[in-house]
Amino acid sequence: MDATALKAMQAPLKEAYREDAAKALITLKARGTLDDQSIACKVETGRALAVARLHPATGGSGLELCSGDMLLEALVACAGVTLKAVATALEFKLGSATVEAEGDLDFRGTLGVARDAPVGFREIRLKFDLDTDEPQERIDSLLKLTERYCVVFQTINNKPALTVSARR
């Protein structure tokens, strides 16, 4: 897809959202079912069933998905799609590219071993390897816009309001 095709595809959406902001508000949903035989959650992905279990650092086998890995995978997927869309819109000459995310966890927090150890990622690093001859200022602009428009990055970076509830 080139910049013209991308802009043509998105133009009616942008116009509709400018005219009626409510049309841009969409609720995405995820659903999982707890496994009654093991410590696992079966998540419906829309394409397949993903089964998440404990990370090996908390007693898992390492053969199944871990929710921390899934978070990083979601970040990589979103950042990659966003980077490609931004590059297309800017007519940025991009050959192949890879995206990597890595994050540091202290599992003492998750397991309740040390109260001063945080639960969750301490740091996440997002890296792009770009095959391009574009000047550095264009690369900087590409990364700035990718960061700005990547939904998962912005969600992690700007903590949303969260609520937790249960029903019987």
Image (cartoon, helix red, strand yellow):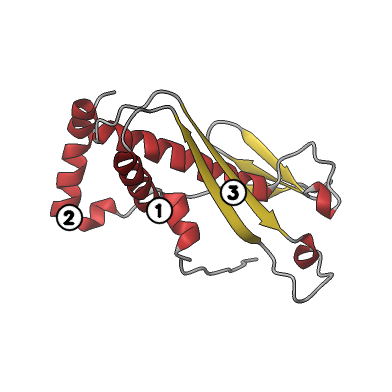
Quadrant location of residue 80? Answer: top left
Q: Image point 74% across, 61% down: which residue?
A: 106
Location of residue 49 in the rendering, given as x and y in whole percent from the top left corner: 64, 35
Q: Which mark is residue 27?
A: 1
Amino acid at the residue labelled 3: Leu
Residue assigned mark 2: 20
Residue assigned mark 3: 71
SS at badge 2: loop
Circle 3: is it few (<14), some (14-19), or many (20+) Cα within 10 Å? some
Q: Image point 40% across, 48% down: which residue?
A: 150
Amino acid at the residue labelled 1: Thr
Mark before the other along the chain sequence, 3 or 1: 1
Q: Are marks 3 and 2 in contact (CB under 8 Å)?
A: no
Is 159 on the left-hand or right-hand side of 100? left
Q: Image point 58% across, 69% down: which residue?
A: 165
Distance CA(mark 3)–CA(mark 2):
32 Å
Distance CA(mark 3)–CA(mark 1):
19 Å
Task: State the residue in front, 168 or 136.
Answer: 136
Location of residue 144 in the rendering, given as x and y in whole percent from the top left corner: 35, 50
Q: Which mark is residue 92?
A: none
Mark before the other along the chain sequence, 3 or 2: 2
Residue 166 appears in the picture as rendered: yes
Task: State the residue in front, 34 or 99.
Answer: 99
Q: Image point 70% across, 58% down: which residue?
A: 105
